[in-house]
Amino acid sequence: MTMFELFALAIVVLGLILVVKSVVMVPQGDEYTVERFGRYTRTLTPGLAVIMPVVDRIGQKINMMEQVKDVPSQEIITKDNAMVQVDGVVFYQVLDAAKAAYEVRRLDTAILNLVMTNVRTVMGSMDLDELLSHRDKINAKLLMVVDDATSPWGVKVTRIEIKDINPPRDLVESMARQMKAERDKRAAVLEAGGYKESEILRAEGRKQAAILEAEGKKEAAFREAEAREREAEAEARATHFMSQAINKGSPQAINYFVAQSYVEALKDIATSPNQKTFFMPLEASNVIGAIGGISELAKEAFGDKSSSS
């Protein structure tokens, strides 16, 4: 093989090497930065790309997908001087490959250190009770602070979640006793309130019963008085008629009053609780005469009415 052939072969091999070096395949989800003589010039997106060999080179290979990093556990002193163990997780995504490659060194470490520092700052300004009951508030505040700090790096922090908050064992036991005391207190208050309500309802029931009973007695007394009034009116009319009859000289009227008094006396003797056996002299002729007098008196009364009509 002549020198010319060797030189041509070397040229062909060098050309193939340069062609291979100039073609770059970027996988989906990544972006590559291109440096010319050590200076950033452009960013290669997923797919095939061509660079100038020898002059250009691939600088940084940046993952553009959303990434998840565990935040290491650390001890935090709260505002009320309680020591707690806290860990978490951070979600972030690179939006600008050039900034992520050249604005910060070791991007993952920088983000983790930034999150841990702000966790201590945010959670250290809160009481333990607030720390345990307001995780959403803590997450939102951390996200706002860290996302604003990482914006110059071309990074978007999408979420920060606090996973575990572990107070010391003695503090947990103290909190459990406090919670039990609060629940016992609420139970006692509710029980007292229920007893009070039941007593009020009983009092209201007794009040309504007394009112209804008084109204019933009032109505009964009114009706009894009305009955007595009507009875008195009837008795007065009967007495008036009898007086008129006596004034006219009718003996039947006198017999009627005697018979009525006689019958009333017999009724009182019969209904007396202390009198079980009694002897009664009964003059049948007088009673019959009295009854006959009543009938004659009625005839005269009705006869007078018919004659007057």
Image (cartoon, rainbow, N blue to C red):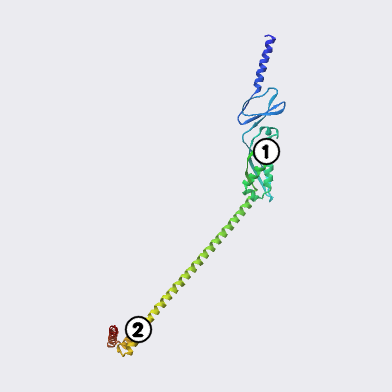
Where residue 171 sits: x, y (%)?
Answer: 65, 50
- Tag count: 2
- x and y, in percent, of residue 61 in the image: 66, 30
**Disc 2 vs disc 1: which is toward the camera?**
2
The residue drawn where x is 66% and y is 16% is 13
Q: Secondary structure at mark 1?
A: helix
Query: Looking at numbered disc 1 in the image, what kind of residue is underneath it?
Result: Ser
Relative to 301, say whether 181 is above or below.
above
Q: Is residue 190 left or right of residue 31?
A: left
Query: Image quadrant of residue 193?
Result: bottom right
For label 2, the residue is 238
Along the line of sight, which residue is nearer the eye, 168 or 147? 147
Q: Quadrant of the C terminus?
A: bottom left
For mark 1, what is the residue? 151
Callout 2: 10 Å neighbours few (<14), some, many (20+)? few
Q: Secondary structure at mark 2?
A: helix
User: Along the line of sight, which residue is nearer the eye, 108 or 76?
Assistant: 108
Residue located at (65% from left, 50% from top) = 128
Instruction: Give the Cα distance between marks 2 and 1.
Output: 117 Å
Residue 195 position, x and y percent, is 53, 63
**216 with respect to 309 (left or right):** right
Q: Nearer the viewer, residue 289 or 171?
A: 289
Residue projecting furthest to the front = 309
* Residue 42 seen in this snapshot: yes
Find out whether the residues at labels 2 and 1 contact each other: C-beta distance under 8 Å: no
The amino acid type found where label 2 is placed reads Ala
Quadrant containing the N terminus in the rendered view: top right
Q: State which quadrant residue 60 falls in.
A: top right
- Asked if residue 273 lies left or right of residue 139, the reply is left
Residue 163 place in picture, x, y as percent: 62, 43
Label 2 vs 1, first from the N-terminus: 1
